[in-house]
Image (spheres, helix red, strand yellow):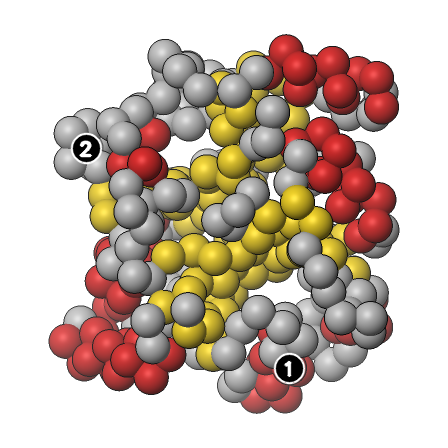
Amino acid sequence: MQAKIKHLAITSDNYALEGKFYEALFGLRASTEHYRPEAACSLSDGYLGLNINPRRVGNQSGLDHFGFEVDDIQTLYARVREAYPTVDWVQRPIIRPFAAITMHDPAGNIFDISEVGDANRKDIYGEGALERPPHPRRIHHFTLRALDPPRLARFYRDVFELSELPRAADDPCHYLSDGQITLVIAPWRIKDFLGMNIERPALDHMGFVVESVEQLQADLEKLIRRNPALTPKALGCGPEGEARLQLCRACRLGEFHLADLDGVLIDVRAG
């Protein structure tokens, strides 16, 4: 029962503009059969669904959670009960387009689970948009910062059967893959945030693979000139911004770094 990583979610006060940014710059596509303009913006890169959800009262904004698709949820429950008794899960509201269940890992990070054939899947998750050839610009990885990366790597490897990828001897990160998407588990150290705002252990950034970094940069300049409302937030401005950019550059999977309209961190590499 190897799971597939099929869902990534952002929470935003500007979800409609955020969606247009990812459509315009990265070529992600919205639902065409079950478009719901009053709801979240659901986009697809051909394999993974990116949801940009309206921020509700009491919710934090930014990169929020991810999600797995499994073919046997009862096997998953049995593995968790046997090896991770502190991990729990809840049923999600039926209106959610992907998630049937939300679970947390041993460090408290939350993720959604959908079983193949779930009747409640909507939008891109229910119309086959995630079974098409991946787009030229697609999501390649996302990074989770954790106090104990080896422990979390074991959890995602043992419970979801993600494959642990080779890494350099001096690399403190763990890389787990479903064959398409890589989950990077990086260490969280408070001293890494010297000179800038300290962030909690949580999802840190997501990474795209593109046909050409130079072409993406040129397209970004054209996008800003054509529609300044889609100008991303500046990354690297001022001493604190420069410190955050340097931490972003520590990810060995990224070549070019930027932020979206809400400040969600993105890195890009040529594929």
* Contact (Cβ within 8 Å) of mark 2 with mark 1: no
Which residue does the image show at 66% across and 45% down from the upper left? 163
Q: Which residue is mark 2?
A: 35
Which residue does the image show at 80% across and 65% down from the upper left? 172
Distance from disc 2 to disc 1, alpha carbons, whole Å, reads 39 Å
Question: Looking at the rendering, in which quadrant would you find the N terminus?
Answer: top right
Residue nearest the viewer, comparing 208 with 3: 3
Q: From what the image shows, is residue 43 above or below residue 204?
A: above
Q: From what the image shows, is residue 170 above or below residue 44?
A: below
Report which quarter residue 37 is drawn in.
Answer: top left
Where is residue 81? Give x, y as percent: 79, 16
- Is 100 situated left or right of 176 in this image? left
Which residue does the image show at 51% across and 78% down from the upper left? 255
Q: From what the image shows, is residue 83 above or below residue 106?
A: above
- Type of the residue with mark 1: Gln
Question: Looking at the rendering, in which quadrant would you find the C terminus?
Answer: bottom left
Where is residue 195? Give x, y as percent: 73, 81
- Type of the residue with mark 2: Tyr
Where is residue 171? Give x, y as percent: 77, 70
Could you tell me which secondary element the residue under label 1 belongs to? helix
Could you tell me which secondary element the residue under label 2 belongs to? loop
- Is 129 situated left or right of 172 in this image? left
Quick check: can you spot residue 203? no
Return the mark for residue 42.
none
Residue nearest the viewer, comparing 127 with 189: 127
Return the mark for residue 246.
1
Which residue does the image show at 36% across and 21% down from the upper left? 121
Where is residue 228? Give x, y as percent: 22, 74
**Count of numbered circles on the image:** 2
Q: From what the image shows, is residue 68 above or below residue 8?
A: above
